Image (cartoon, rainbow, N blue to C red):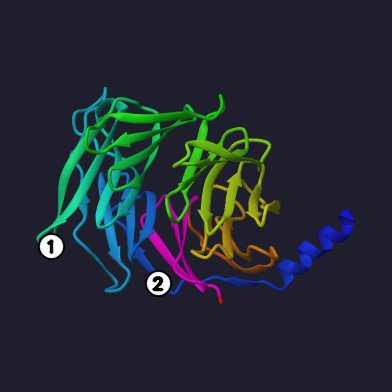
Amino acid sequence: MKILLAFLVLLNLAFSLDIKEPYKIIEAHSNVISSSLLNDKLYLGTDSGQVNIYDMKSEEFLEPIVLPKIKTHFTDDEFAKVFSIDELNGVLMVLSETSYGKRLLHVYEMIDGKRVEAKTINLDNESIKKALFLNPKTAIIGSLSNEIYFLNLETGNIDFSKKFSIASLSDFELSEDRSKIAVGCESGIVYIFDAKERKVLNELGFHKDNMYDIEYKNGAIITGGVDRHAGVYIGGSIGMMRSNFLVYAVGLSDDGKLGAFMSDDLSDIDVFEVNSKRVLARLKTMQSTINGIRFIDDSSLISVAYEKKVKFWRFR
């Protein structure tokens, strides 16, 4: 059986397509730490205190968001790192570093055609990793302590918190309607949490060790782990796809039918059909370590790495 499975994997790769050249390359202001593709805008959070905004329709960069410089124990003139970016109903939320390693939540609104910082909330917690909108009045923030918090954006208070286990938090994502949260942990388990009922619906054992990235769309989940596998959950079952290296980044198309993962130490990306696990293409990115894979549609995606260059690919 093992020989047959190995043969099928090799056969699968033999019929996939190696793609060596992107159809477009853009450059961020500096190395990219975080990224989001939301409502035809590609948001790039950099290590130089900027959010670069690329308009997918006009194919040009818009006015960037420039964060104030911060203080550390070594200097009073340091760039703030941008950890996560989310958008809901035209309101943008940016989680960044602030002075002495703490975290700051920025909320931006569009007023008379201009993006204006409407609010900042100091988060007195150095281990906050990510922030997403639950609804217009509430943000979900996740901590390394494997806790999520419902932060009231009007009062700045925590209205609810949930700790999932003693393992540290790796990543979390929301379903399209923002009613469910997929929380991935260092233990290799993904918890599906109902944000309205405030209870765990399911525990999925993807990996035997830490995971790095999660995508959650249309009921499908894909994870990337230190065990050199991409985990795929669809239709109530979990499957695993082998990588030749640590899987630092994964991606899912909006309908959850196509997936992608970093598949080796050269930052190649394998694109596959979620149901069949059939590999469609291998993208030879030649980038540094991939930290974001964003599907544009069912034939193209964007690869983001810790570097300035952001690459656009067609895989079929």
What is the number of the mark on residue 244?
none
The residue located at (31%, 41%) in the rendering is 138
Image coords of residue 244 (percent x, y): 67, 51
- The mark total stands at 2
Residue tagged by mark 1?
113
Picture residue at 29% right of the left edge, 63% below the top: 54
135 or 90, nearer to the observer: 135
- Residue at x 47% of width, y 67% of height: 301
Alpha carbon distance from label 2 to label 1 = 28 Å
- Which residue ends up furthest to the bottom in the rendered image? 316
| Residue 249 in sight here | no
Q: As displayed, is residue 23 above or below residue 103?
A: below
Q: Report the amino acid beneath label 2.
A: Lys
Q: Element at badge 2?
A: strand
Q: Quadrant of residue 24?
A: bottom left
Image quarter for residue 103?
Answer: top left
Secondary structure of the residue carrying tag 1 is: loop
Q: Which residues are magenta?
A: 289-315
Is 233 left, or right, of 157 in this rendering? right
Q: Which residue is mark 2?
A: 24
Which residue is located at x 74 percent, y 68 percent?
12
Give the left or right position of residue 33, taking residue 13 as reference: left
